[in-house]
Image (cartoon, rainbow, N blue to C red):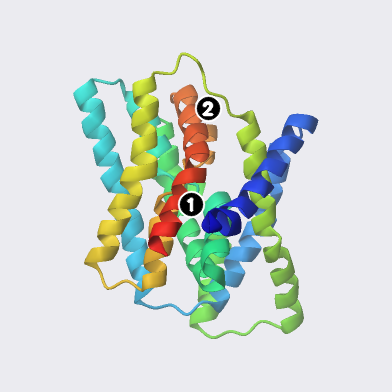
Amino acid sequence: MTIFIQVVLPALLIFVAGFVVQRWKRMDIKSISTFAVYLLTPALVFQTFYDVEFDQQYLFMTIFCFILLFAIIIVNKIYSRIRKFPRDIENGLILSTAFMNSGNYGTPIILFAYGETGFAYAISFMILQSVIMNFFGVYYAASGRLGFKDSLKSISEMPLTYALILGVFMNVFDIHMPENLYTAIDLVGQSAVPVVMVILGMQLAELKIDKVINKEKLIYGTIVRMFLSPIIAYVFVLLLPIDPLLGKVIIVSAAMPTAVTTVMYALQFNTSPRLVSAIALVTTLVSVFTITILITLLG
């Protein structure tokens, strides 16, 4: 109960605030989201990588992100082959289970649970997931119609990509930024987390569970995203000499619900949007309990 009150409840209240405001005022989420993506998040990303001390742990994190991605893709392909699902259902399941909400859900939870050091790891994990989702997520949403070049283009259009490159470059070559300029970036970056949390609540207000959704697919997607994913993370952490704090961040991040961004991809390319939307909503609701239990178990 203590973990829920201290870690999950603060985040939940902000999500609820966004949810209520969106239900009440029906604001343009796209404009607010664009503001966060193009200004707030890049500032936070730059600040994080400008200050961070790179070590072997970041290599482990990168390796894990790709292992988790391909492991879940393989599981979905095997399941879809056994059940003889069409391509759009298979890709819809991949979208809703392989990509977690490590940004506007995961980072604040990690911050409340593990402090600033854990938060730095969470931001790095979020960026890796963003790059992966903008490449593989768009690819699967388009049912494989997009080529390598188009996927790279989607990544090149992400502002945080350039913030990441600039932050790493200045960090590695020890290039110091004027204090007044850094203060401005820090101020903007600090506003990123609460704003994206409100945006998540607003996005959830637009999600619905269609009554015709097959319960088997819904239950399967929820189990893979909320239970199989953190189990894979736990095994990975056991097998490698990973820092205990990073290990907790990886496991908790892997247990996050479906990324709401995948719903937009599914809608854009008509890749089982109702199924992806339903799994995103159910996993978010379930996560209130599973995340609380997981953080309690991890200590």
Q: Which mark is residue 193?
A: none
Look at the image and tell me whether residue 91 can be seen: no
**Which residue is at 34% across, 23% downward?**
216
**Which residue is at 46% across, 50% downward?**
291
Residue 56 figure quarter: bottom left
Q: Nearer the viewer, residue 181 or 275?
A: 275
Q: Amino acid at mark 2?
A: Leu
**Relative to residue 279, is residue 21 drawn left or right?**
right
Q: CA separation, marks 2 and 1?
A: 31 Å
Seen in the picture, residue 280 relative to 11 is either above or below; the reply is above
Q: Classify mark 2: residues with Cα within 10 Å, few (<14), some (14-19) or many (20+).
A: some
Seen in the picture, residue 95 relative to 32 is either above or below; the reply is above
Q: Secondary structure at mark 1?
A: helix
Residue 181 figure quarter: bottom right
The residue that label 2 is drawn on is 267
Q: Which mark is residue 292?
A: 1
Q: Residue furthest right?
A: 25
**Which residue is at 36% across, 74% downward?**
243
Query: If the image is split into quadrants, where does the C terminus sit?
Result: bottom left
Numbered disc in front, either 2 or 1: 1
Residue 90 in percent (x, y) is at 32, 28
- Given contact means CB atoms under 8 Å apart, are the residues at marks 2 and 1 in contact? no
**Which residue is at 33% across, 31% downward?**
220
Query: How many marks are shown on the rendered structure?
Result: 2
Residue 154 in percent (x, y) is at 50, 46
Q: Nearer the viewer, residue 228 or 128?
A: 228
Q: Amino acid at mark 1?
A: Thr
Q: Classify mark 1: residues with Cα within 10 Å, few (<14), some (14-19) or many (20+).
A: many
